[in-house]
Amino acid sequence: MSLQAAAFLTAAFLIVVGAAGILLLDNLIKKIIAFTFLSDGVNLLLVTVAYVEGGHVPILLPGMSIFEFAEKAALVFPAGIVLTNIVIGVSTTAVLLALTIVLYRKYGTLKASIALRGEKE
Amino acid sequence: MSNQPLVALIVVAPILVAVLLNLGYGKIRFSKYLFIASAFALLIIVLLSGYGYHWFAGHPIFQGLRLSLEYVFTPYHKFALFILSLLLIFTAFAASVSVVGKPGVYYAFLLLCYASTAMAVLTNDLYHLWIAVEVASLIIAGVVIAAGSPGAHRATLKYMFITGFAGAGLAVSLAILLGVTGVANISDAVYALSTMSLEGFMPTIYMAYAFFVIAWIYVAGMAPTHPIKADIYRYSLPHAAALLQAQAKLMMVAIGLIILRLFGSMPFTRESMLVISLITAIFGVVLALMQSDLRHVLAYIVVSHGGLVGIGLSIGTAYAISAALFQAINDIIYMGLLFLACEAIILLVKRDPAAGLGNLISKAPSLALFIFIGSFAASGIPPLNGFQSELMLINAALSVGLPEVAVVILFVSVTTFIALFKSIYEIILRPKKVESEVLGSIPNSLYASLFILSVLCIVFGLIPQLPLSFINPMAAEVGLAWPH
Amino acid sequence: MIALAIGCVAALLQKDLLRAAIISGAESVVLAYLFHALLAPDLALTQAIVGAILLPGIIIVTIFKTRRFEE
């Protein structure tokens, strides 16, 4: 199996495990770790789209012609998307963890079934 | 069409002012005046921009492809951003009165809310759209957390979990479209999808469509995420909820138009969007009927009218799209009016409307009048603007041959009326059951905001051709035929 | 890649939350190496720093402020 196909399968597995973790697990911190797996899977998927078989790194080394670069280098645009995604993932995880601490102080437990239930007005 | 550099300023200026507000967060009066002045400045920038486009790293068209990240500014964009800027000004007035403490960072978040919506409305490429959705989700989290109640913390936690799904899904969709077509600009992608042979690619393109629709559902708060988004509207401060519902409607319309342009001609795409919108519209109003708190009722009505806009977008003919865009603008106006009226009630009696009130009509009759105008507009009573747009939606559904959809729209309209007046009777008309003393006063700026929004409700209801002249060119450009 | 698959399931089945955070940090390093093999060295550097230091760092701070073992 080629590297790209194997990487696609791994990315799909990470996405599915992450999504199932967010929906099914009970502990809030495990939900957040599953969320990081979900975004890792998506980043891996994006990088695998950018891969070129037998190509080289998308940096224009001195002495390389532009046509050779355009033919053989891996795609650059998905790398930009992945960098943005990593930053967004860290910010979202930080906000989620802060909210977890606040909810723990109010309810005394990390179980999602108690901390996230609806308010009885 | 010419290059308009002022258009990029609509998105960049709020970000710069937000940075300044962050730096000066200790100085209260500086933050307040800077926030209100920048809201007025944004309105002037929107009015001054000419129609055209703006290319980032602009280079000329190469073999018919645009190949760049782009903002487009048509009459529809000018109209939509004008309404959004008006709402930002009114929210700025309300926030400067009712937020205590050091509000610089909170004002920065409200400005960034405006910037992310403007980015989603103006953009013509997938990268900016994805950035707008991700930034909007973090900003909504910040704005709702500022309300401080444990309900707000719970609502934000649940919201951030589904943000992960929607943002990740939109990135996957971006990857698939980039891999299949090779370009990120949406006009180029539409051209590429229509001219290349898509033999083995159809399943992957349907996957891209599915993730796009998941992002659309998340932004608008449609089924099955409607309780989470309704909690966001209910637990935030009411003036922030006014801005957030405008953001949700405008971003939902933007993403819906892009879905129609990219995937609208493929089979079963619009039918599935129609089913989701119908479920949202029905469940939204039914849940609104069951709530006892006015802010919860308003939140569920916002979600269910989002379903109405989705019905119009899914039908997809030019008349249906202009009905949906008109309904979205009207929703922003009257729901903004009702949320700001909630803010006024809280300022007046210094208590949440959730606790029992009564007999407000004798203490603040003009406020009661504005609430009545807003509720009549939301219920679709002639001659206000809600009636005109819902009439257009019903006509669009009938002209395509879907009378069941027209029945659903009528049902939503009637149930909105019942749900709103149940709560408003408790607050305004019921005499002397729980007497509430007037503890504060409503500032003149808030009265002016409510007055201007009511005038817009009446004017758009009596002269629907005025807003429709802005909307129709855009609808005609995107409109498709219904395939039966 | 097999290490990634086994690791992520193992991390989510732990009773000790600290161990789950450390396994996710180790997985980020493996992912960084995979990015390098897929011709994206800049992403490998970013992912290694963020996933091995930043994310486990803030998760461990949260664990110490709440509770360590899942009940």
Image (cartoon, coloured by chain):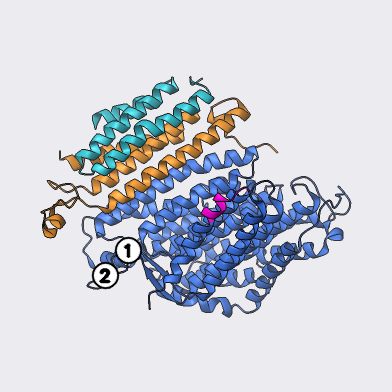
Chain colours: A orange, B blue, C cyan
Residue beneath disc 2: B65
| Outermost right residue | B432
Disc 1 crowd rating (10 Å Cα; few below 14, some 14-19, many 20+) is many
Work out whether disc 1 and disc 2 sit on a shared chain.
Answer: yes
Q: Which residue is the site of mark 1?
A: B185
Residue B453 position, x and y percent, is 67, 68
Q: Are marks 1 and 2 in contact (CB under 8 Å)?
A: yes
Q: Is residue C48 magenta?
A: no
What x and y, as percent, mark residue B190?
Answer: 31, 66
Q: Chain of mark 1?
A: B
Q: Give the answer, above or below, for where A38 lies relative to B464.
A: above
- Tell whether B444 sits left or right of A117: right
Question: Which quarter of the figure has residue C46?
Answer: top left
Give coordinates of residue B243: x percent, y percent.
59, 57
Q: Is residue B428 above or below residue B316?
A: above
Q: Pointer 2 indicates a residue of which chain?
A: B
x then y, percent, for residue B289: 67, 51
Quarter of the figure with the N terminus of chain B:
bottom left
Q: Is residue B307 visible?
A: no
In the displayed structure, would residue A64 be above or below residue C69?
below
Tell me the chief SS of the magenta region.
helix
The amino acid pointed to by label 1 is: Asn
Q: Nearer the viewer, residue C53 or B261?
A: C53
Task: Tell me the residue at 65%/78% (across/down).
Answer: B462
Taking depth in this image into account, of B308 and B6 the one nearest to the observer is B6
Q: Specify start and end residues of the magenta stretch as a single range.
A: B18-26
Above or below, B477 against B411 in this view is: below
